């Protein structure tokens, strides 16, 4: 019985998706319809879902405001709560996401990404192939980054509170590109590297969450790193964030063989002024 | 004869209410442009699948228990913190009120079903301990100037008196919740007299006529078949035993009801997401409160199960109702 419901709902959804696109452009009826149809009921299975995309939870503006404040406080109290940082980004990033989406649309490669919707996950990456690539190639350096810093691309939280399916994908892409950005910029995942990447992202994307992270992140750095940040790393990150091409518009999955230097030139990013080494995670 | 007629009539009314409840949820969930779920529901009724509510969702009965288990498995670690945050600490007053109405004396046996993290059981042990102390103080005061006869009888009686130990059994279907409860007990140092048992409220792993008091606090709305749970309660209680149930109920005052609804649906899932990282479990929580029968209907269900002298007390304007009944 549940599979019948699922089949009918997916059928309706595939019919409804172009309707939704039409709706967004001409402000036709159905978003209210969709909301009533997909009540805010609970779903614990991945295969069927209510909402605009898997994991979507519909929220009222009041709830979004409460979430933004609550997640901000929670993230400040415990910066290791990545889910709270993610929620803060989703609830405050509406206009920045629209801006990013439009930039992607205007770029041919970005448009291809928006249509094909690639995901960066361990299941979609061919790690063995990437390990055989020459040193200095983007794929090999990314793999090295993952190993040195003991991170995995699967640790990104799913988007929950963005009320537009395309913008939700843009947000998800932003999260998944974050690690690749570390590789491009040559920044490790310690506090200083993260803050530098946040400055770059704040300048590039304009997401309020990045701006908040960029402003509050330095508070946890010691004096020596603060000096490094403000004199060399910071200005470099900001300048490159503003001048580089939109990093979300790059189809990284097709560029593993390209060399990092080449990619940097194409994106108009200067190499980092200081080489930082991957220290133990969590140290400042 | 009249009593059984009354029972049948009451049951018929209750059944019709429940059907209305389920179908109205279906209507509100539908919109003009979708026919899918409604036609599928027709199929399910025709096929004879028994379905029940899980929050505002309709699920097969067999699945509800599993889903509820998953919810409490997810929330167990942060359960107490969330209770304090959601009720602004008032849940402690509700539970204290339960104990106050219960007024247990030393020597009684308590069964706390869906007792999970042990709040009721801990309060119970504290209460009987203080009652016991009070009794001892009273006894001591009345014997300030004992005669030689009294002193000698006291020396012989002392050993016999100690066997008035109260015992509390905490029963829960969810192992995670019991684990959290046990850890709390160990850290608070209250382990004597407490037992922790895994069990289903619809099928309790105890013999008949075992307990003096049966409590279920904020658990009965998660049970799939509430009438079965009530019948089990009747079975395991001794004659003269008391059934007590704390549960969220219908708010009587309309102004307070609006505020309560707004608070429940806007704030509580947000709190769940921020504090426990789990929106959906707390969405289920507030929806399941709305699906539970109101004070009078629940009183009727308790009477149908066979309890006598059933009454209820509204706490916090009806947000919580404390139902009590006796097995005679």
Image (cartoon, rainbow, N blue to C red):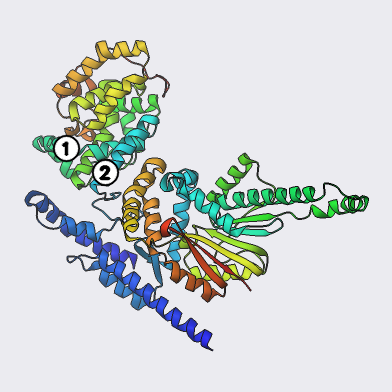
- Chain-order first, disc 1 or disc 2: 2
Q: Position of residue A187 (x, y in %)?
A: 30, 21
Looking at the picture, tell me which residue is in the foreground, B191 or B123: B123
Figure check: A116 above or below A136 = below
Residue for badge 2: A64
Q: Position of residue B97 (x, y in %)?
A: 54, 54
Which class describes the residues within 10 Å of circle 2: few (<14), some (14-19), or many (20+)?
A: many
User: Quarter holding the C terminus of chain A?
Assistant: top left
The answer to whether residue A236 is visible is yes
Residue sitting at x 25%, y 21%: A185
The residue lying furthest to the bottom in this view is B1
Looking at the picture, tell me which residue is in the foreground, B201 or A123: B201
User: Quarter holding the N terminus of chain A?
Assistant: bottom left
So how many labels did they put on this image? 2
Contact? badges 1 and 2 (CB < 8 Å): no
Q: Position of residue A48 (x, y in %)?
A: 31, 57
Q: Chain of mark 2?
A: A
Q: On the same chain: label 1 and label 2?
A: yes
Label 1: state its secondary structure: helix
Residue for badge 1: A95
Residue B152 is left or right of residue A107, and the answer is right
The image quadrant that residue B273 belongs to is: top left
């Amino acid at each position: 019985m549940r599979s019948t419901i699922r089949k009918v709902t997916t059928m309706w959804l595939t019919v409804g998706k172009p309707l939704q696109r039409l709706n967004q452009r001409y402000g036709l009826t159905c978003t209210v319809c969709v909301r009533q149809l997909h009540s805010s009921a609970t779903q614990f299975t991945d295969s069927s879902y209510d909402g605009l995309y898997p994991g979507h939870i519909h929220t009222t503006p009041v709830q979004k405001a409460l979430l933004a404040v609550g997640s901000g406080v929670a993230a400040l109290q415990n910066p290791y709560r990545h889910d709270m940082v993610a929620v803060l980004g989703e609830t405050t990033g509406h206009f920045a996401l629209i801006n990013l989406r439009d930039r992607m649309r205007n770029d041919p490669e970005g448009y291809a990404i928006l249509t094909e919707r690639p995901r960066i996950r361990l299941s979609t990456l061919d790690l063995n192939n990437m390990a055989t690539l020459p040193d200095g190639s983007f794929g090999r350096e990314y793999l090295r980054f993952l190993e040195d810093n003991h991170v995995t691309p699967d640790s990104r939280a799913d988007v929950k509170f963005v009320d537009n399916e395309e913008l939700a994908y843009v947000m998800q892409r932003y999260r998944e590109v974050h690690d690749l950005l570390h590789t491009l910029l040559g920044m490790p995942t310690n506090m200083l590297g993260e803050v530098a990447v946040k400055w770059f992202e704040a300048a590039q994307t304009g997401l309020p969450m990045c701006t908040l992270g960029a402003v509050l992140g330095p508070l946890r750095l010691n004096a020596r790193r603060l000096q490094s940040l403000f004199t060399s790393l910071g200005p470099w990150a900001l300048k490159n964030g503003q001048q580089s091409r939109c990093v979300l518009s790059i189809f990284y999955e097709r560029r593993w063989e390209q060399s990092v230097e080449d990619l940097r030139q194409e994106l108009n990013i200067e190499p980092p002024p200081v080489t930082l080494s991957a220290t133990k995670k969590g140290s400042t | 004869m009249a009593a059984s007629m009354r029972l049948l009539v009451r049951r018929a009314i209750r059944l019709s209410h429940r059907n209305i409840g389920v179908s109205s949820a279906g209507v509100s969930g539908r919109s003009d442009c979708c026919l899918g779920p409604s036609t599928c529901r027709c199929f399910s009724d025709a096929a004879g699948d028994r379905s029940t509510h899980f929050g505002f969702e309709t699920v097969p009965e067999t699945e509800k228990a599993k889903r509820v288990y998953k919810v409490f498995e997810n929330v167990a670690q942060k359960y107490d913190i969330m209770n304090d945050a959601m009720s602004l600490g008032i849940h402690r007053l509700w539970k204290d009120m339960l104990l106050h109405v219960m007024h247990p004396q030393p020597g009684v046996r308590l069964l706390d079903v869906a007792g999970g993290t042990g709040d009721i059981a801990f309060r119970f042990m504290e209460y009987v301990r203080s009652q016991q102390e009070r009794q001892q103080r009273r006894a001591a005061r009345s014997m300030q100037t004992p005669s030689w006869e009294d002193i000698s009888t006291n020396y012989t009686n002392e050993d016999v008196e100690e066997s008035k130990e109260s015992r509390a059994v905490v029963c829960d279907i969810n192992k995670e919740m019991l684990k959290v409860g046990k850890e709390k007990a160990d850290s608070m140092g209250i382990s004597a007299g407490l037992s922790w048992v895994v069990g289903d409220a619809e099928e309790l792993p105890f013999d008949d006529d075992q307990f003096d008091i049966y409590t279920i606090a904020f658990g009965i709305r998660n049970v799939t078949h509430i009438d079965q749970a009530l019948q089990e309660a009747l079975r395991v209680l001794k004659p003269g035993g008391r059934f007590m149930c704390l549960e969220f109920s219908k708010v009587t005052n309309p102004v307070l009801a609006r505020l309560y609804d707004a608070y429940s649906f806007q704030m509580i899932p947000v709190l769940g997401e921020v504090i426990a990282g789990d929106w959906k479990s707390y969405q289920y929580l507030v929806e399941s409160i709305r699906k539970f029968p109101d004070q009078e209907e629940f009183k009727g269900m308790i009477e149908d199960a066979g309890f006598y002298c059933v009454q209820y007390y509204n706490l916090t304007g009806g947000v919580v109702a404390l139902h009590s009944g006796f097995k005679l």
